[in-house]
C-alpha cells in the first residue's frame, strides 16, 4: 500500500501543528509501513560530555512513529502515544545529526505498534532502539488517553 | 539505609552539571530507595491542546530515577539510563506542575531498576508511569554505553 | 469502588476457562484496582540452578493483571494482553511459592495499565517487576488483536 | 563476524542444559548477530480459542535472544535476561509452528540488546515483537541478578 502523505506534506503538517519541534525534526521519506526521519542536533539537545539527551532521542523515536502512522492513515487522524520502551545502547556524538527509521508491525483499528532504530547519519551502528504503541481513536471521538 | 545526599545537595549538583535542565526540574525529597521530584511546567514543554509533551514526561521520569540513585550512592558515580518503558495514561494539564515519584526496586553492583509515577501536583491520578534501568559503572571505569 | 468478583469467584472462573494453569496459579485477594495472586511452584516451572523460569514469572504477572481487571469489570469481558515490560531483578528460589501483586493505574474504556511486583512468599524483596497493558474490547466485539 | 556455534551445537547444548524445553524449541540457524528459531506448538502451549499462550511467546523470544548471544560468544558464558518488553499484535493459530527471529543491536561487555519478531511459519505477518536485554557477567563471576 502506498502512503497517503508525502514527506513534504508531513513536514508542512508538522510546521503548522507542532511549531515547537519543527526545525528540529524532519521527515526524509515516507513509505509503505515506515518512515525515515532526521533530528537536526542543536545545542539545546546536548548533555555534558557532548552527547544527545535521552528525552531528545525519545522525541525522535516518537516522531518517526507518528510520521509512519500518518503516512498510512493521512493527516486527519488523532493518534497518541500510549507506550514507549526505549533502549540506549551507545552515546551519540553531539556533532552528527541522527536518523530515526520506523517500521510499523501493526496498524489496527485501535492500536498501532512499531519499532524505531536511531543511527548517527552515515553510520549503521544504532545508538538507540525503541518500540512504540499508538492509540488510534475512531474518527470523531476523543482519544482514550483522557481521564 | 539513609540517603547519602540531601535534596538541596542534589539540586546544587544538578545546577552545576546539568544547567540545561536546572530551573525546570527540582528534587523535593530524597529518602531510602526513593525520590520525589517536580517539573516546573513552562511554555517549551507544551504541545497543542495545552498538554505536556511526551519527551518532557520522559525527562521527568529519568530525573526522578537519577535522583533516587544518586541519593543512595552519592554524587560521584557515573550512572546512565539503559532502558525506559513508559506508559502515557492521561493528558496532563498545561497549568499544573508535575510530581515524579521514584521507587527503586534494585540497586545492584551493575544495574539499578526502579518505577516512577507522574502526577499533577495535588492529584493522586497518575498521568504516566515508567520503569527505568540504569547501568552503574564501577568507579574509575567508563560506562558500558560507549561504543 | 469495590470489586465485582471475589477471589473465590475468580478462582472458579479460572478453573472453568483456563484448566491448563489452574492448580498453578490462584488469587488470594481482589480489591479496589488491585489483586494479590500466588504461583504454586512446581517442577515444570524450574530451570537449572534451582530457579523459576522467566516465562513462569511472566505468566504470574499476566495472571495478576488479568485478575485485577476482571475483579473490577466482572467475568464477562474479553481482555487481552497487548504489552508487557518485565524486569528480572533477583533469582527466585525453587523452594518458595511466589506472590504477584498487581496495582491498576488506569482502567479506561479501551486500555488498562498496571504494575505487578513479584515476591517470594514471606519476603519483601521483589524478584521481578512488570508493567502490562490490556486491551478491553467493547461488549459484543472481537478484540483488536485479531489480524 | 561469524558465529562461534552452529545451530546443531546450540541444539545439543540446549538438550543437555535445558531438558525442560528441548523438544519444544529448536534453533534453525545462527548467523552474525542473529538467530532463527522455531517453537514446535504442543497442546500445553495452547489457550482457549485455539491460540498460543503469552508465556509461550515470551519463551520463544527469550530463547531466540539467548541463541543469538551464545552464537556470538560461545557456550561457556553465563547470560541472564534482565528485561523484556513484548507486544502481542495478532492471535497465533494453534495449528502452525512459530518462528522467532532475533537481531542483536548491541553485544557489549556487560549488556546485550536485541529485537525478536515472531511469525507463524510460512507467514510474514508478525504475531508478536519483543526487545530483550541480557546481562553478560564476566568470566568467573556470578550474574548481577543474584541478590
Image (spheres, coloured by chain):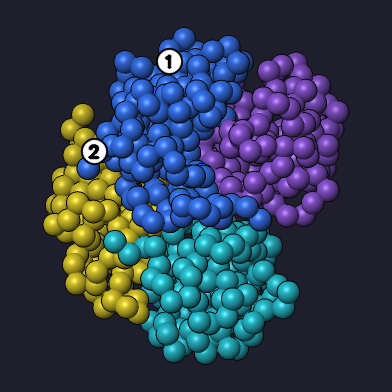
Chain colours: A yellow, B cyan, C purple, D blue
Q: Chain of mark 2?
A: D
Residue C34 visible at all: no
Residue visible at 75% across and 16% down in the picture: C16
Q: Is residue B99 left or right of residue A57?
A: right
> Where, quadrant-wise, is the C terminus of chain D in this rendering?
bottom right
Residue C89 percent across, percent down from the top left: 61, 51
Instruction: Place residue C57 in its image quadrant.
Output: top right
**C-alpha span from label 1 to label 2:** 28 Å
Residue B74 percent across, percent down from the top left: 57, 80
Residue visible at 51% across and 39% down in the picture: C83
Residue visible at 53% across and 54% down in the picture: D141
Residue D49 percent across, percent down from the top left: 57, 14
> Where, quadrant-wise, is the N terminus of chain D in this rendering?
top left
Q: Nearer the viewer, residue D119 or A23?
A: D119
Q: Is residue B62 left or right of residue C129?
A: left
Q: Which mark, by number, is residue D2?
A: 2
Q: Nearer the viewer, residue A82 or A90?
A: A90
| Residue marked by disc 1 | D97
Residue neighbourhood size for the residue with mark 2, other residues' Cα within 10 Å, grouped as few (<14), some (14–19), many (≥20): few
Residue visible at 81% across and 21% down in the picture: C12
The secondary element bearing badge 1 is classed as: loop
Amino acid at each position: 500500500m502506498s502512503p497517503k502523505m508525502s514527506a513534504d506534506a508531513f513536514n508542512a503538517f508538522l510546521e503548522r501543528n507542532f511549531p515547537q519541534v519543527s526545525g528540529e525534526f524532519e521527515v526524509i521519506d515516507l513509505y509503505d509501513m515506515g518512515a525515515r526521519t532526521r533530528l537536526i542536533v542543536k545545542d539545546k539537545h546536548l548533555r555534558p560530555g557532548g552527547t544527545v539527551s535521552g528525552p531528545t532521542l525519545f522525541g525522535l523515536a516518537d516522531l518517526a512513529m507518528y510520521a509512519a502512522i500518518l503516512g498510512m492513515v493521512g493527516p486527519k487522524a488523532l493518534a497518541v502515544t500510549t507506550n514507549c520502551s526505549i533502549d540506549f545502547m551507545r552515546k551519540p556524538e553531539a556533532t552528527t545529526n541522527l536518523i530515526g527509521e520506523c517500521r510499523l508491525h501493526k496498524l489496527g483499528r485501535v492500536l498501532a505498534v512499531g519499532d524505531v532504530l536511531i543511527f548517527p547519519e552515515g553510520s549503521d551502528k544504532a545508538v538507540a532502539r525503541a518500540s512504540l504503541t499508538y492509540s488510534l481513536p475512531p474518527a470523531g471521538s476523543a482519544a482514550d488517553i483522557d481521564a
